[in-house]
Image: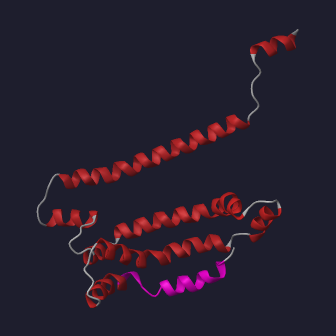
């Protein structure tokens, strides 16, 4: 795959920022550069923290990728876009999906980084922390319940969509049943 040989260099250069160090270095860097902390600085700090992990996950799949599949698609007349859409992306998608899940979980669980880099803006974990320490409100357990129920509903919906897609795909490729009239004609 084009560009695959540069992935170790990209991963190693972004791996210079350890997760523990980024919790303390990101706020001091923001203060040193006189940048006003906001949600943008929090996003940047979380990207520095998450990109090495996602890069490692995706690079494992990239290294296992067989370039001959793309070459065969091009030999059969596929354009670059068709090759990417039909060959490359479906093979790399599980790694991309896994990297996205890891990125979300690592970012969600890195509360100190959010706390130190958001400034006056408030992310959901920082807001919940503020409500738990300063003034308790019934909205906090309700929000906690929603953070459990919504992902469960999303997973159930995703499973139902996949099952529906598979059943429609098998119906489309299965032979069509004969109509009653054609069966009667065959019997005579």
Asked where in the image residue 5 lies, by quadrant, the reply is bottom right
Q: What's the image's color scheme?
A: secondary structure
Q: Residue 151: x, y in percent?
A: 40, 51
Height in image: 15 above or below 153?
Answer: below
Is residue 41 left or right of 63 when viewed as pictured?
A: left
Height in image: 185 above or below 163?
Answer: above
Height in image: 53 above or below 29?
Answer: above
Q: In front: 134, or 124?
A: 124
* Quarter of the figure with the N terminus: bottom right
| Residue 137 located within the stretch drawn in magenta | no
Q: Main secondary structure of the magenta part?
A: helix
Is residue 16 left or right of 150 when viewed as pictured?
A: right
| Residue 13 located within the stretch drawn in magenta | yes
Q: Residue 119: x, y in percent?
A: 23, 75
Which residues, given as a range, are shown in magenta?
A: 3-20
Height in image: 124 above or below 179?
Answer: below
At x 43%, y 48%, the residue is: 154
* Quarter of the figure with the C terminus: top right
Q: Residue 39: x, y in percent?
A: 30, 71
Asked where in the image residue 20 lies, by quadrant, the reply is bottom left
At x 47%, y 44%, the residue is: 157
Q: Residue 40: x, y in percent?
A: 33, 73
Is residue 125 left or right of 155 when viewed as pictured?
A: left
């Amino acid at each position: 795959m084009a560009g695959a040989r540069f992935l170790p260099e990209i991963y190693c250069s972004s791996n210079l920022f350890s997760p523990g160090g980024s919790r303390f270095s990101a706020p001091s860097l923001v203060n040193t550069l006189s940048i006003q902390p906001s949600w943008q600085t929090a996003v940047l700090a979380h990207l520095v923290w998450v990109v090495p992990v996602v890069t490692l996950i995706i690079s494992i799949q990239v290294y296992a990728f067989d370039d001959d599949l793309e070459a065969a698609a091009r030999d059969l007349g596929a354009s670059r876009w068709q090759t990417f859409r039909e060959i490359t992306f479906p093979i790399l998608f599980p790694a991309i999906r896994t990297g996205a899940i890891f990125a979300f979980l690592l970012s969600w669980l890195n509360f100190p980084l959010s706390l130190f880099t958001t400034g006056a803006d408030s992310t959901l974990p920082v807001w919940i922390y503020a409500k738990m320490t300063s003034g308790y409100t019934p909205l906090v357990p309700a929000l906690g319940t929603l953070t459990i129920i919504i992902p469960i509903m999303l997973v159930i919906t995703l499973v139902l969509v996949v099952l529906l897609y598979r059943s429609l795909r098998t119906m489309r490729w299965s032979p069509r049943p004969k109509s009653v009239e054609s069966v009667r004609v065959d019997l005579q």
